[in-house]
Every structure is written in structure tokens, then in C-alpha cells.
Amino acid sequence: MTASKRTALLFVLICLVGLIQVQTVFGQEARGTIMGVVKDASGGVVPGAEVKITNKAMGTVNSVVTNDTGLYQATYLIPGLFKIEVTMPGFKTYVADDVELRVNERLEYEVKLEVGEQSETVLVTGETPLLNTASASVGQVIDARRVADLPLPHGNPFFLIGLASGASFTRDPRLDRPFEPTHIVGYSMDGTRANRSDVTIDGVVATATANASEVIASYVPPTDIVAEIAVQTATFDASFGQTEGGVTNISMKSGGNEPHGTVYWSKMAPGIFANDFWANRTGQPRGEFDYNRWGGSFGGPVWIPGLYNGRNKTFFMWGYEGIHESRPRNNGAPTVPTAAMKNGDFSALLKLDSKYQIYNPFTRRPAATAGRYEQDKFEGNIIPASLINPVAKKILEYFPDPLQTGDPDGRNNFVQPNLLEVAKYYTHNVRVDHMISDRHKIFGRGSVYRRDSTYNDYFDNLTTGNEFQF
């Protein structure tokens, strides 16, 4: 191998090592296990049988040998479809095809060998057990087909949690975008309090704690790169003991030997949507809004021409999504100071009522009545320029002038009838899987997102614009 090839290969390995995430710290695992016992036709155990478990998408093979009691176990398997092949001299070769392993599942698969020539094959299909006897946890798995086919608002996979029996959504359903972290995890599990359940992605915690105890989402992956979702509404597994409610584990897609990808785009606008029932009844037009969501994914083996061929060994999956949305936002009826008030002149209020009299706080002193204090009035309800802090005066320059007269005392004088909230959201997600050997595997995943929003941008300037930016 030339020096340039060694350098390039070393660079690839460094990148893979840099992506390693030490998941054992969290005590949770998204990958699964296939285990069981190999028996003969009479029910006796068969020690020393070779069991090969092949990931059909990746082509990776895990080889194990049954122990003295006929037991076998293959761990840290990426969820998907597998082929199980069992060979033993004196018995026919046993092949089970399309055995489905789900996220964080311990799948028990019993094999019964028939006496015969090893060159003969017994082929079994569709034998994946429907009942998980290796775990007492209660819940439901949302498989890849439903993840891909079910319509989801804004492509938010967290809404699929509601398919599980015992899961009830209790927050505002209108706040369902992937960058609204509090509401989208507002599920109650089997009667527990809302926002007390945990969410993991590939076994890594994807939530944070807010308001002392409430759980919020720290990241929401695009549905296009989600392989499967497992919802545990009642968790009896000690590895999930840190949560009051249930646990949702999201498994991300991995690359395979065959390159594949997707591209998608969705749009919503008033011209292609019917009016709201109540607005239509009162003759009100549908509010102005515009929504675009686009993205794509691409995965396959890591292949560098002339340097590295990752078929059956190293795989990647990349996904991207962007959201641009503008929609009406009612900011209520804010109040801003008038030009006179910015200069300390509140005389207009005093003409309405004496209760609007303002006082000089620097003249506060004990009054004749014990326990009480008094202050001098500002003459004419005008604060002298010498008492106005220059920093405060500079800040007041960012307040716009009133748009309306408002109430008699000047309140509610900044009503914006056509205020729009504009949100822009972008996310990238990359996963790399590498098979070191039958027993040793590593994977790494990196996710990043950015959100720019004019939420609460009442004044349309630097003081309130882009208030939320991540």
C-alpha cells in the first residue's frame, strides 16, 4: 500500500473514531439482540452448532456457536431484516429468512434441526415471534412502513407516539413544529403526568429538563431518516428507571450495501387550502400564510475509489431538512411610550386624573405619621432632563411611536393588524456504522439544527427581531 493510500485510510479511521458516542454512560441501547436455543427433533439441546446471523441490508454476518446448553446470542444488532443460518454435522442446514429485529428488542428465536445431510437445507420464512418473551416492558413498536406512510404535521415523528396504547397528548396541538420543544413531547403515559416521559435517539437521551421538572425535546429528527419508533408506556427495565413516565426510543436509518436516497418537498398556502369553517361562516378570508418543507437523504457503503471499499463493512446515512414558514400572529395590544413620554413628559396623563401623578423617588422621606413615607411631586408631571438616565434614554429610542391613540390613558396603542411570524429551520443528520468484526461494531451519529424566528418581533428592529436563534 502506498503512503498516500495509507494516509487516506488513516483519515477515514480517524473520522470513524471521532464519531464514536459512548452510549453505555446512559445505560440505554437502541440496537437489538437475537438469541435462542438450538434443539434436535426430540427436543434435546445441540451444543457446538454454528449460527450465522446476517443483516440483509448491510450484508454483515455475526457468527456464534451454541454453548453446552444449546444457547446462542448475537448482540448489538442494528434493527432490520436478518437471515439466520444454523449448521451442524449430522443435521440439515436450517435457514430462517426475513426475521425482523426491532429497536431495542431482545428477540428469542428457537431453532429445531432435522437429522440429515448438511448439504440439505430446511428453509423457514415468516417465523418472527409476535410476542416478546424476553422483556416485561409494555408498549408498541411503530415500524418503518407506518413511519413512512402516515401523514405527519411538519414531518414530526414525535406525533407517532400517540399511536401507542396508553399514550395521551395533553399540550397545544397547534404547536407541533419540530422546533417547538415543549409541546411536542407533551404526552401522558398510562396516567402519569405530561412532559415526564423520556425520548432517546439511537439510545442517547434526546431530551432536557425545563421548569424544574418538565421534559422538553432537545432534537427532533426528520421522519425521512427515522427507521423505527419503540414506545414503552410502562417500563420495567432498570435501564429506563430515571423517568416518571414512559420511554420512546427512536432508531435512525443506517446505510446499506445498495446506495439509495430520497428527495421531498411539501407546500401549504391559502390558494390551495379551504377556508376555516368558522371564518367562512362569518365571511372572513383565510389568513395569509406560506409554508415550505423540503429535504432529502442519501445512504450506502463508504466507498473511496482506489482507497477504500466499505461494502459489508462501513456504511453511512445523511439526511437534511429545511422549513420556511410565515403565518399570522396576534401579538395582543402592546403599549409603547409616546414621544413626550420618552422625554419625561407625562403631563397629558395628569389632565385625565390625579391618580396619574408621578413623584420624585429621590425625595422620599419619613412622613409625620409613623411608618409612612412621602415624596415630592414632579411639577406638571414632567421629569427633569437631569434625572433621566442616558442609557435608559438610548434604550427608549428603540421603542417605535404609537400606531393608534389607544385607550384614554394611552395604553394598547401599538396594535399591528398584519403581523407575521417568520420561522426558518434547518437540520443535518449523519450516521456512520462500521463493523470491526463479528463481535465488535461501532457507530456514530451527529445532528445539528438552526432556527431563526421572528417570534415576538413586535417592533421589527434589533431589540425584538430574531429573538429565538439556535
Image (cartoon, rainbow, N blue to C red):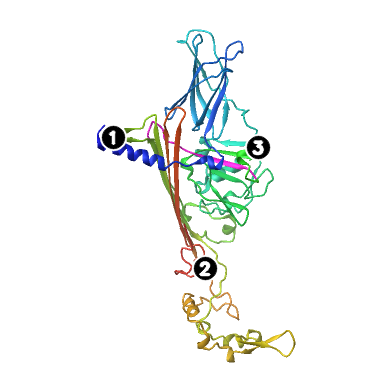
Badge 1 element: loop
Query: Which of the 4 quarters of the picture holds residue 406?
Result: bottom right
In the structure shown, which secondary structural element does the residue marked by tag 2 occupy? loop
User: Label 3 amino acid?
Assistant: Phe
First reached walking from the N terminus: tag 3 or tag 1:
3
* Tag 2: amino acid: Pro
Asked whether 174 or 44 is in front, the reply is 44
User: Counting other residues with Cα less than 10 Å from the Cα at mark 1, is it few (<14), some (14-19), or many (20 or more)?
Assistant: few
Task: Using the image, tell me which numbered label, if any, was put on residue 417.
Answer: 2
Mark 1 — residue? Answer: 305
Task: Compute the Cα span from label 3 to label 1.
Answer: 49 Å
Q: What's the residue at 33%, 38% (across, down)?
A: 10
Report how far apart the C-alphas of labels 3 and 2 lie in the structure. Answer: 53 Å
- The residue segment tinted magenta is 245-261
State the residue position of label 3: 236
Q: Where residue 5 appears, x then y in whole percent?
A: 27, 36
Q: Give the residue displayed 66% in from the left and 88% down from the top.
A: 365
In which quadrant of the rendered view does residue 241 lie?
top right
Q: Are marks 3 and 2 in contact (CB under 8 Å)?
A: no
Q: Secondary structure at mark 3?
A: loop
